[in-house]
Image (cartoon, rainbow, N blue to C red):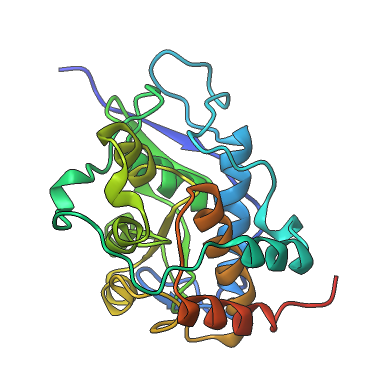
Amino acid sequence: MRPRRVRTVHRMSRTGRVADRGPGPRTVVAGAIAVVLWALAASCAGSAAVPGRGSAPGSVPGPSSLSAPIGDIPAGDARARLAALVIDDHPAPEGEYRRSDWPTWLDIDGDGCDARSQALIAQSTTKAQVSFPGCQVVAGDWVSPYDGVSTDVPGDLDADHMVPLENVWQSGGWRWEAAERRAYANDQAVLVMVTAHANRSKGSSTPAEWRPALESDWCAYATQWVRLKVQWRLTATTRERDALGQMLDTCAPD
């Protein structure tokens, strides 16, 4: 049997300050979500470094169409996107939401790494350790932006969909063909690696019902939420739009 190879995959050097370096979950300082979303959007701009099948190391682009790191989007642009949202306070989707209609953790771009592994690699604040063949992420350093916890154990984390799948379905995704559902569910611009507790706390909630605990993280969260809603042609409710506006009020002046 051939031994498995472990490669170190470098993704991103912008990090939140870690309170301690012991193994397992740790708590980090405020602003964690801006760091993670910077990495998320930067990787989606075509700079993902995932050496895999059929590609040169460090050259594999992600499947997203985002064009700039989230930190480079002025608050004014986010407000323009917010104003462009289509408001529907009485959505009437046909049929029922079925999670099985939204297949996840697929290798969309054929690089040998599935969407979860790509997200782990992209959002590690240090060099991710990846075992090949199979693209199994075995170690790294991650910040869970929703609750400010960091860990070096990939199994501690869930891959959350920033705009939850059920909300996408209610907001217009019920009309999508299977290919579009598949694309959204595995889009690197959508996935955020967070603790299981934070993921379950958020569930399918919009910002009208749930926000990150740290107010310092609201700007980045709302900016990315609005961007995805506009990019994927999804509607919002009045309460959702108003909550997003409140969160954008926390952004620093342009």
Whether 54 is drawn above or below 182: the answer is above
Q: Is residue 69 left or right of residue 225?
A: right
Q: Image point 49% across, 78% down: which residue? A: 238
Q: Is residue 8 left or right of residue 175?
A: right
Q: Image point 14% across, 47% down: which residue? A: 100
| x and y, in percent, of residue 212 in the image | 47, 80
**Quarter of the image where one finds residue 200:** bottom left
Decide which of 52, 106 is in the foreground and name it: 106
- Image quadrant for the N terminus? top left
Q: Is residue 68 left or right of residue 25?
A: right
Q: Image point 57% across, 71% down: which residue? A: 222
Residue 85 can be seen in this image: yes
Q: Is residue 1 left or right of residue 147?
A: left
- Image quadrant for the C terminus? bottom right
| x and y, in percent, of residue 183 in the image | 37, 37
| x and y, in percent, of residue 78 in the image | 69, 64
Decide which of 141, 242 is in the foreground and name it: 242
| x and y, in percent, of residue 143 in the image | 48, 66
Residue positioned most to the right? 254
Q: Image point 43% across, 47% down: which residue? A: 119
Q: How many marks?
A: 0
Residue 30 can be seen in this image: no
